Amino acid sequence: MKKFLCVLLTAVMLLSLANAAAFAEKETVRVAMVTDTGGINDQSFNALAWAGLEKAQAELGVEVAYLESVTEADYGPNLETLYDEGYDLIICIGFMMADAVTEAANAHPEQLYAIIDNASTAANVTGVNFATEQCSYLVGVAAAKMTKTNNVGFVIGMVSPVMNTFGYGYYAGIKDTNPEIVIQPYNANSFGDVAGGKVAANSMFTNGADIVYHAAGGTGIGVIEAAKEQGKLAIGVDQDQSYLAPEAVLTSAMKRVDNGVFTLCKGVVEGTLHGGDVLYTMADGAVGIAPTVTLMSQEALDAVKAAEEAILNGTIVVPATQEAFDAAYGADLYTLDD
Amino acid sequence: MAKKLLKGNFIYTLFAIIVGFAVGAIAMGVAGYNPLEAYGSLFGVVFDTTKTMSYSFIEYATPYILTGLSVAFSFKTGIFNIGAEGQYVMGSVAAMLVGAFVPAPAVVLIPLCILASVAVGVLWGGLVGYLKVRFGSHEVLCMIMFNWIAYYLSNFLVLADGINVGGGKTWSHSIQDAAKITITDWFPKNAVSSRTHFGIVIAILCVIAIYYIINRTTLGYRLKAVGYNRSAAEYAGINANRCVIVSLAISGALASLAGGLQVMGVTYKVTQFAAQESYGFNGITVALIGATNPIGTLIAGWFFGAMKYAGTRMKLLDGTRVPKEIVDIIMGCIVFFIAISNLFRAFVMNRGKKGGKA
């Protein structure tokens, strides 16, 4: 037994020495990400973010890696591990990690961190947000062109200044296209209430709507289900949600996390990333409308295309705040922010 | 001496662990990784610094030691506590509720949180025992359903007004500083992991207490008697029904305590689950590796915690990038070979003399 232990300990010692030697060389930029508990294969944010890193590896020559979190107890150790490994930038995927990244950033002020979908919480944390009012504007235009009843719905998962940007863009896109259209708003107060989303969408359909846009995460799954069952249309969010119900999802307002992550890497390579809040827009390719167009009419596609160009060349500035929206469209139109 | 060794569990567990690593090495070889390098880093990572050791043996291991102990204890009464998962969740919710909302100084609040998580575990486990003896419902099915009840109850509570932290976040309020049992500040900067907590001491005390109960008390004797042969135990005048309830209550308390300590020492809050976190299910693995012996469970818990911690870091090895799932393969093989160890034992014992049996 004793002998066995001796052999084991010697092996451990030798191997850790070999390890230390392996870490000696280092010059390329190294970026790593930590997934939230969804894991790397979540077919959503984490997977998209990793795709962005792989693109950075291929095009920028950045060395990339990821660590998966199985439970929230893994956030801290994962961030610490990456810190110990000396990565130039550590990206946290999703606001779930807000507390963990704040703690890590305060403990290691010289390390660069970034977090997706959350404001910067320390000087060395880059808070990455997306101009979601722009993609919402495009789906608003699409909804206005496609509605037959001149009546559409909007389901929001939570009312906050950030979430309201979805509503401002959507409302602006609709009203700019056809001021006659009636919009039914609903605040589900949850991102995980599938049943609630379904009930809300069903009542909107009963009240005459034929298209409902959701910015409500899991609650929105219920919206899409309702549209599918009622033979109406839903508009997805964050990614191309057409795969959930190809016959019922008209289009989706996409948040290109992969492009956002890629832009972050570029910032590190060029030495321009120094913390603070950044907003990625349509011009960065970070927001846009889904590529799936099977349910869209040619007229709607043309209108969306025109709106996209107008946003890009600055002819249309989509309101992103309550003041800007109320100034352009009146305070009584969008009621969720009251 | 040699015969005693061959009859006992230790040698077979060791054998299973070696085989598990061998199978893991083959899997890595097939997938194109260098197993020697990977295992070198696995052990290297664990024993690298005092910090990585505290990650492995304190931060990661503590919940597994307790859920493992919970499952091991229930095995003694012949019951398979697959409900440790749900009990763990209930314990974490109870500790969070008390820790976040009861205003009290640390000396009162910390014991109160521990008490709350233990109490809810006694109820959650004992209730299944009651259903079993009163209505004859099968405890395994019952506990699997109780796991989901706990899961959704926890998700409901962390999103409920007043408990949810607000602002669109999907987690509860954090516990007050007075309820935290993290002791990182007691050590020099960067010497230990950021969530080193004295829950490990409580876990070790539990191991000693359970060892004592099983081996040195009439209660332990009764529980074991029911576990070996329920009918014989009843014939001998032992109230088997009562034993089942007591066993599940204690087992539930241990798993819940794991959840409570995790909240008090590591997470500080309860977050909406995306999937079951498997602290309870992994407790089954730990109990099996530990040969359902309390001391064995302690060592197995340390082993498991170290593997979990080191497994995530294997990904970062320069040049290898071994997926962390390799650790799951190793663990699965170990459990498999422990499960069939009776076969080996019978084989080995029968070679010398006829009639050798576990």
Image (cartoon, coloured by chain):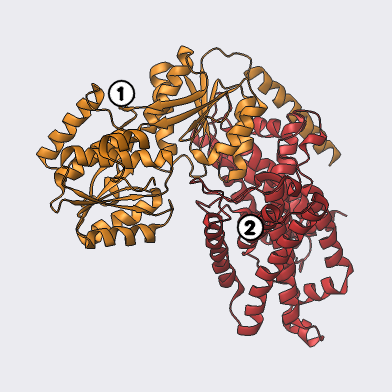
Toward which corner of the image does residue A222 lie, by quadrant?
A: bottom left
Residue B213 left/right relative to B79: right
Q: Nearer the viewer, residue B68 or A91?
A: A91
Name the spot of residue A156 as percent of width and height, x first: 36, 49
Q: How many marks?
A: 2
Q: Which residue is tagged 2?
A: B93
Q: Which image quadrant: the C terminus of chain B?
A: bottom right
Q: Nearer the viewer, residue B191 or B213?
A: B191
Q: Secondary structure at mark 1?
A: helix
| Residue B10 in view here | no
Name the spot of residue B265 as percent of width and height, x first: 72, 46
Name the spot of residue B127 as percent of width and height, x first: 65, 74
**Mark number, residue A283:** 1
Question: Marks 2 and 1, Cα distance to the nearest angstrom?
Answer: 45 Å
Toward which corner of the image does residue B293 lie, by quadrant?
A: bottom right
The chain carrying label 2 is B
Q: Secondary structure at mark 2?
A: helix
Label 1 amino acid?
Answer: Ala
The residue drawn where x is 24% and y is 57% is A228
Label 2 amino acid?
Answer: Val
Colour of chain B in the image: red
Q: What letter labels the chain drawn in orange?
A: A
Q: Which image quadrant: the N terminus of chain B?
A: bottom right
